[in-house]
Image (cartoon, helix red, strand yellow):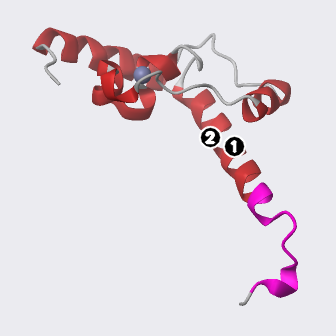
Amino acid sequence: MLISFKERIREKLLLEKWKVGSSTDKPLTDNQIEELVINPPQLCDEPQLCESRHLSDNGCICMRSVFENENQFNQWKSAFENEFKKRLFVGVDISDIEI
Ligand SMILES: [Zn+2]
């Protein structure tokens, strides 16, 4: 993927800004987190074509349009992972697991 130097700099600045967030950003509420766990935000429509993703990975512009800052993204990510683990073990009897 060919990305201009100017574009790389711009992306880097936007990513840094997103990571830090703004003082007016609020953490996601439990309701918002729940909603996002049930309806997970779409990553890039086409990750291969997302220039921003190529440069910023999970902090790409598509994610930045859903979460105000990285903190919110992490809130959602850990809630989502917990939910996923829970579902993974639903229906599994604890005595079936070899320890
Ligand atoms: Zn993207």
Quadrant containing the C terminus in the rendered view = bottom right
State left or right for residue 10 relative to residue 39: left
The foreground one among 53 and 69 is 53
Q: Which residue is mark 2?
A: 77
Residue 90 drawn at (x, y percent): 85, 63
Q: Residue 49: which quarter of the image?
A: top left
Say which residue appears at 45% left-offset and 26% top-offset. Answer: 19
Query: What residue range appears in magenta?
Result: 86-97
- Identified by mark 1, the residue type is Phe
Q: Position of residue 56 (x, y in %)?
A: 34, 28
Relative to 82, is 20 above or below? above
Q: What secondary structure is marked by label 1?
A: helix
Q: Could you tell me which residue is drawn at 28 percent across and 27 percent down?
A: 55
Classify 10 Å Cα crowding around label 1: few (below 14), some (14-19), many (20 and above): some
In this rendering, position of residue 24 left or right of residue 44:
right
Horizontal placement of 70 versus 25: left or right? left
Q: Position of residue 38 (x, y in %)?
A: 78, 33
- Place residue 96 in its image quadrant: bottom right
Mark 2 residue type = Lys
Identify residue for label 1.
Answer: 80
Q: Which mark, by number, is residue 11? A: none
